[in-house]
Image (tube, helix red, strand yellow):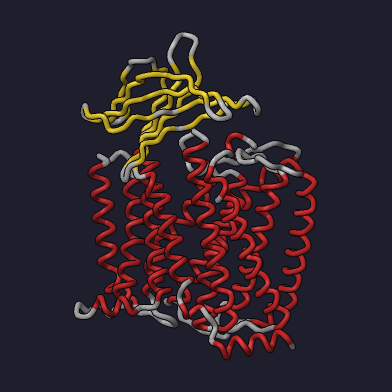
């Protein structure tokens, strides 16, 4: 087994992703059945939503586990590289989010029927494309550990058959399932349409950037590389717009909304988000706009979720807690999931805005400063592991003269595999991580050492966990279950 894969996190990361892929196959099956029958209604949406939510939940956990594994195991200090294998799971995640929101419109307002069916097809299609990218090896990836080109051909054929057949069926039958719901320009439906457009375009951007190296090589015989700068510049605007409209759409009523009522519901969240952004600007001494901007958007999403919850309790002080407890579990789940997204956004923006990196040659007994911390290379030891030889460094990490951690980064050699690996040492904290990686011994003495101070890094995965908890809460709501009579009627129609 590849030494990089000899980690407990890899026992859970791939299964969760594939559970997500398989879960989306159920939504795909419902979409095909709807096209064949020419019928999409509220009962159909109630069937689709829990399966899509379960698949989204599995994908969220799988992506978070993979990101955390890359952070502490690969030793490069990052958590997301826009690698093709990473994008392979992110694309169906984006489409499944759009599908979840679109299915709500079908259930509540009998609108967006054909669009929702198309999203169900695309969500599973991107899952098949992702499996092809991971297993075929057609795209260069730092996560390519088990390529099988022959199997990739079969996966490509399966993808073509399923997607080609489903899209042909959609082209022939979509007109039979047009929505009948009518809604105003300013309404929750309109906000969810914009939500869907932004998510779909974001997924398309990721897809184009992922496959463009392959297209360029096949069409133009040129090798090109599409990396983080492209994805950061092209994906971020759509996600920023999505975060900006999310709290507004959540408090809008169905069919038609009044701007005055929206402002009265959400103004306090906007003021609070501006206050937090101003505080971040002050403590960051104006170093970067990224930190305050990201903190504003993340806080806006979180406080908007709280405003949504407050609006649903009647906005009255007396009996607020009692009414909040009686709210449907799915309402709580939505609020928790949105808050988790906001926390992740704050973590990402503050990490990129305030991260400190130091690369140097360190000698035993030497002390150096990184940010507000003093690090001392106290010792370097040779350690025999169960199936590897390790060079382990011992660093004392101090702040204001007080030791706060002792870190032991390693450089391992696996004799059987004949390859070196790095084992980062991380002192995790609520508001920062101290991240250390040791490299090779230098000819002039000393060791190559990379040190990072990563503010709010753990907020990224904490937010993902909270998102998953929100999904689990929503999934437990009894309203997701079709009434017994509706279920019997659906089964009878399917059997005819």
- Which x, y percent locates residue 170? 71, 73
Residue 67 position in % (x across, y down): 50, 46
Residue 442 position in % (x across, y down): 48, 13
Q: Quadrant of the N terminus?
A: top right
Instruction: Tell me what residue is drawn at x 56 percent, y 27 percent.
Output: 388
Q: Which residue is drawn at 53% across and 26% down?
A: 412
Q: Is residue 242 visible?
A: no
Which residue is drawn at the image coordinates 46% and 8% (left, top)?
444
Q: Is 414 on the left or on the right of 259, as rendered?
A: right
State the quadrant of the C terminus.
Answer: bottom right
Q: In the rendered view, does 487 fall on the left or right side of 101?
A: right
Determine the residue positioned at 57% across, 70% down. Answer: 51
Q: Position of residue 355 (x, y in %)?
A: 37, 37
> As displayed, is residue 416 above or below residue 199?
above
Q: Which of 478 and 196 is in front in this view?
A: 478
Q: Which residue lies furthest to the left in this view?
A: 318
Residue 460, relative to residue 256: is it above or below? above
């Amino acid at each position: 087994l590849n030494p990089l894969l000899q980690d407990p996190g890899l026992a859970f990361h791939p299964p969760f992703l594939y559970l997500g892929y398989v879960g989306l196959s159920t939504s795909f099956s419902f979409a095909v059945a709807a096209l064949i029958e020419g019928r999409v209604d509220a009962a159909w949406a109630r069937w689709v939503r829990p399966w899509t939510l379960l698949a989204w939940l599995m994908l969220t956990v799988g992506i978070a586990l993979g990101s955390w594994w890359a952070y502490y195991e690969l030793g490069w200090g990052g958590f997301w590289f826009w690698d093709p294998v990473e994008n392979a799971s992110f694309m169906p995640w984006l489409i499944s989010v759009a599908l979840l929101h679109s299915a709500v419109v079908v259930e509540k307002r009998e609108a967006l029927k054909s669009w929702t069916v198309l999203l169900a097809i695309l969500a599973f299609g991107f899952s098949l494309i992702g499996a092809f990218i991971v297993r075929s090896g057609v795209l260069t990836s730092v996560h390519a550990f088990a390529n099988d080109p022959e199997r990739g051909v079969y996966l490509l054929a399966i993808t073509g058959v399923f997607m080609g057949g489903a899209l042909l069926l959609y082209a022939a039958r979509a007109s039979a399932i047009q929505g009948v719901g009518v809604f105003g320009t300013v309404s929750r439906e309109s906000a969810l349409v914009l939500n869907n457009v932004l998510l779909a375009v974001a997924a398309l951007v990721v897809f184009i950037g992922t496959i463009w190296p392959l297209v360029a090589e096949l069409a133009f015989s040129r090798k090109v590389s599409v990396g983080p700068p492209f994805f950061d510049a092209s994906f971020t605007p759509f996600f920023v717009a999505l975060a900006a409209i999310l709290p507004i759409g959540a408090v809008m009523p169905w069919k038609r909304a009044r701007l005055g009522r929206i402002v009265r519901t959400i103004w306090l969240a906007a003021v609070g988000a501006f206050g937090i952004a101003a505080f971040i600007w002050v403590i960051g001494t104006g170093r970067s706009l990224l930190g305050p901007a990201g903190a504003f958007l993340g806080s806006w999403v979180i406080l908007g979720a709280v405003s949504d919850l407050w609006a649903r309790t009647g906005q009255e002080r007396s009996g607020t807690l009692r009414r909040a407890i009686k709210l449907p579990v799915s309402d709580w789940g939505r609020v928790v999931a949105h808050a988790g997204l906001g926390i992740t956004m704050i973590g990402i923006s503050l990490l990129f805005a305030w991260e400190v990196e130091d690369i140097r040659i360190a000698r035993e007994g030497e002390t150096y400063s990184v940010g507000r911390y003093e690090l001392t290379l106290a010792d370097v030891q040779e350690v025999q592991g169960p199936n590897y030889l390790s060079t382990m460094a011992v660093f004392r990490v101090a702040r204001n003269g007080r030791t706060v951690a002792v870190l032991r980064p390693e450089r391992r050699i696996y004799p059987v595999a004949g390859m070196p690996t790095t084992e980062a040492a991380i002192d995790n904290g609520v508001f920062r991580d101290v991240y250390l990686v040791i490299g090779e011994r230098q000819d002039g003495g000393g060791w190559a050492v990379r040190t990072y101070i990563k503010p709010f890094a753990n907020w990224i995965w904490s937010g993902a966990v909270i998102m998953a908890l929100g999904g689990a809460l929503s999934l437990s709501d009894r309203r997701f279950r079709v009434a017994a009579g509706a279920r019997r009627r659906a089964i009878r129609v399917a059997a005819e």
